[in-house]
């Protein structure tokens, strides 16, 4: 059985439903999968998650979580999913321990009962258990929020942008924790604006302006990228980008780390490109073949 | 039940840890009673009065002894010359000075009329007004007394004239008024705000995605404020009995019961507001315009309902504090039992049930 089934789901806001946040989305997530919804701000990730967690009613389409319809059986879903909203949503004036105990009671369970599930995460914040949640660092808040979302051993876990605004080290740790949870058989849906986190998911859906552009494993998504990408750098990166985009053989060029990723048209010639760039006055030129990344796929899908 | 208790416990933590708000909530009745007590109560006891007696005859002695006998005044000094007046006020030796002219007795005897002058320290206008009124009353009494024994009516002209609003009205009416206001502020506004705050900070979102019945969430929010209000009711009653000398003439149990009923009315209104609004500002605004203003303007506390134009009189009927105000006055001051307030009690119960039902119906089980 699929853990999450989304079928032509749509959501609009505003009096006249003029803001279309989610447009006829369909995808499925298997049991035990770590599924990433990747998309920039305003893509509609939060709206999608809120519909799946029964917080918002869809305008059209339907969705089921662990076999329960998000509209008709919303009460069932509320018992068995875990949800961590994008904003830190715990009580800042309660201590770490009090927050955890509170969320355990509202799910009719106790911290002891499911301690094994959160143990790995909780031990890291346990030394601060009497500290007020508002006084924790970003990374620790996130661990506490995750512990609270897990305390009732949910079958599906929804994490809305859990790593936004968290430092790089904590982000890495967080994905490690998700891997562990996956091994416990929990289906995890996670949304993120960071493309570099795509590779850490089993499968991803690329989302943009309310639509899912593509769904697949990271390898499938990058594998669908047929054109050649060259990584190009020189002593004057700004001028270089202009020159690249002005070239007839270049499909698209954009900065990517210390290189400019340059998508080439078919039948291009590397030497001709090099001569052209040198002629334009670029020095210390490096041109090398590069593997497409999820971000490259995303850039391409967005242009279509 | 365990769930519910843990909600209540959490709510107490919120209130207890926000010391500033707690202080305001518990201090409010005391401050309000004090403010209203001094601003509105016209009862002043043992105020210092200085007397400049330029006549020193049988008539003035008689008048002075009557002032002495009054519980309102203590004669603090006798002045020798008009030049001492300013100094007396400066040194705070008296709040009011009575000036009896040298010709007092002879004027009274020969012209059948005499003049006295009352000078009050107007830096505290309320007290000044009150004291002048007391002194005038004593002088009028004195005049009546001497007229009993004389054939020709004698007139004493007092130089200060003031319109007076009957002595005890202020003190007796503001205690029920303050009670209505404090309960309304604590219950309506605070419940509305705390629930809406959970929406704003996002915790409501997390709680909705849980098996808790939404009703439990909101009722648990109301419980601590109910307890807090009981503390406030008790402190208002203690203050009025022991500080303001406003007695509780009726049954305390009935008074407490009615106050708790009104508290629940206010809580229900707060819950309703929280169900309908999404921001703390809006909630506060609605609580203020929906409860606070009507409580002040239309409950009869500041302005008598009977004197209002018909439309306002009709509107005042749906203001819960109007009925509560009547109940408290009846029980506390007139000493009536339930037979005297059953009608108002039924109206409050009906209003509460209506508000509560609506609040539960309107509670949003989703985010929109
Ligand atoms: N409550 C709302 N009312 C109106 N517009 C909204 C609301 N929530 C989201 N939107 C709009 O819907 C779009 C998608 O938002 P959201 O689902 O929050 O995307 P994301 O989480 O990917 O940033 C955005 O354009 C946003 O402005
Ligand atoms: Mg979002």
Image (cartoon, coloured by chain):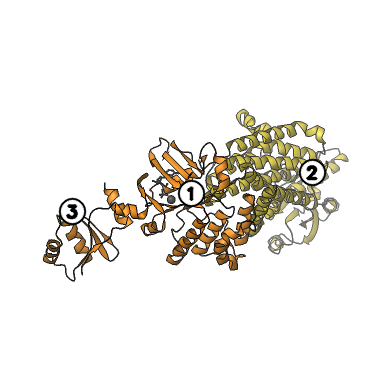
Q: Which SS class for mark 3?
A: loop
Q: Chain of mark 3?
A: A
- Residue under label 2: B140
* Viewer-nearest residue: B117 or A136: A136
* Viewer-nearest residue: A22 or B237: A22
| Residue A59 seen in the figure | no
Among the chains, which one is yellow?
B
How far apart are the alpha carbons under marks 3 and 2? 111 Å
The dot on residue A265 is 3
How far apart are the alpha carbons under marks 1 and 2? 96 Å
Q: Residue at x 18, y 53 (%)?
A: A265
Q: Chain of mark 2?
A: B
Q: Residue furthest right?
A: B149
Q: Chain of mark 1?
A: A
| Residue B138 seen in the figure | yes
Indicate the colour of chain A: orange
- Residue under label 1: A31
Left or right of B96? Residue A98 is left
Rendered view: A224 above or below A72:
below
Q: Residue at x 30, y 54 (%)?
A: A223
């Amino acid at each position: 059985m699929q853990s999450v089934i989304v079928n032509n789901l749509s959501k609009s806001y505003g009096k006249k439903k003029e803001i279309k946040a989610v447009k006829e989305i369909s995808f499925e997530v298997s049991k035990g999968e770590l599924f990433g919804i990747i998309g920039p701000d305003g893509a509609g990730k939060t709206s999608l998650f809120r519909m799946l967690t029964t917080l918002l009613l869809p305008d059209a389409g339907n969705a089921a979580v662990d076999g329960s319809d998000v509209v008709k059986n919303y009460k069932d879903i509320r018992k068995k999913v875990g949800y961590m909203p994008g904003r830190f949503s715990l009580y800042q004036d309660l201590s770490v321990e009090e927050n955890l105990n509170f969320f355990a009671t509202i799910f009719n369970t106790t911290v002891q009962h499911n301690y094994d599930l959160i143990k790995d995460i909780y031990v890291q914040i346990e030394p601060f258990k009497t500290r007020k949640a508002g006084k924790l660092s970003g990374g620790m808040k996130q661990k506490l929020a995750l512990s609270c979302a897990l305390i009732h051993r949910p079958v599906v876990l929804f994490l809305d942008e859990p790593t936004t605004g968290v430092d790089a080290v904590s982000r890495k740790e967080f994905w490690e924790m998700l891997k562990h949870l996956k091994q416990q058989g929990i289906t995890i849906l996670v949304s993120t604006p960071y493309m570099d986190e795509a590779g850490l998911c089993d499968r991803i859906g690329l989302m943009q302006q309310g639509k899912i552009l593509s769904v697949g494993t990271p390898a499938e998504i990058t594998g669908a990228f047929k054109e050649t990408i060259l990584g190009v750098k020189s002593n004057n990166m700004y001028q270089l980008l202009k020159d690249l985009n002005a070239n007839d053989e270049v499909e698209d060029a954009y900065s990517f780390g210390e290189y400019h990723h340059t998508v080439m048209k078919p039948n291009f010639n590397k030497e001709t490109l090099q001569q052209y760039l040198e002629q334009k006055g670029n020095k210390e030129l490096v041109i090398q073949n590069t593997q497409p990344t999820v971000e490259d796929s995303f850039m391409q899908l967005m242009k279509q | 039940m365990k769930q519910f208790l843990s909600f209540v416990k959490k709510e107490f933590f919120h209130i207890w840890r926000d010391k500033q708000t707690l202080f305001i909530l518990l201090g409010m009745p005391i401050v309000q009673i004090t403010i209203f007590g001094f601003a509105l109560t016209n009862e002043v006891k043992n105020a210092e009065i200085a007397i400049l007696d330029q006549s020193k005859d049988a008539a003035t002695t008689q008048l002075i002894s009557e002032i002495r006998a009054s519980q309102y005044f203590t004669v603090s000094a006798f002045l020798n010359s008009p030049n001492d007046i300013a100094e007396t006020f400066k040194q705070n030796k008296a709040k009011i000075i009575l000036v009896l002219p040298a010709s007092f007795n002879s004027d009274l005897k020969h012209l059948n009329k005499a003049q006295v002058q009352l000078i009050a320290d107007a830096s505290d206008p309320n007290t000044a007004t009150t004291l002048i009124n007391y002194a005038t009353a004593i002088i009028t009494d004195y005049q009546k007394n001497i007229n009993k024994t004389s054939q020709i009516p004698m007139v004493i002209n007092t130089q200060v004239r003031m319109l007076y609003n009957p002595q005890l009205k202020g003190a007796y009416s503001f205690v029920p008024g303050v009670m209505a206001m404090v309960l309304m502020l604590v219950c309506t506004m605070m419940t509305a705000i705390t629930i809406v705050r959970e929406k704003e900070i996002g915790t409501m979102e997390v709680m909705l995605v849980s098996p808790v019945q939404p009703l439990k969430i909101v009722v648990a929010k109301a419980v601590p404020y109910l307890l807090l209000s009981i503390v406030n009711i008790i402190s208002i009653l203690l203050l009025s009995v022991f500080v303001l000398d406003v007695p509780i003439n009726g049954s305390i149990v009935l008074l407490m019961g009615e106050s708790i009923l009104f508290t629940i009315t206010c809580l229900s209104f707060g819950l309703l507001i929280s169900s309908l609004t999404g921001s703390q500002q809006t909630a506060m605004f609605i609580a203020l315009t929906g409860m606070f203003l009507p409580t002040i303007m239309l409950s009869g506390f500041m302005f008598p309902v009977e004197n209002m134009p018909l439309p306002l009189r009709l509107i005042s009927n749906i203001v819960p504090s109007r009925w509560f105000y009547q109940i408290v006055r009846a029980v506390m001051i007139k000493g009536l039992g339930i037979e005297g307030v059953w009608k108002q009690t039924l109206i409050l119960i009906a209003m509460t049930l209506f508000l509560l039902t609506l609040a539960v119906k309107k509670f949003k089980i989703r985010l929109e």
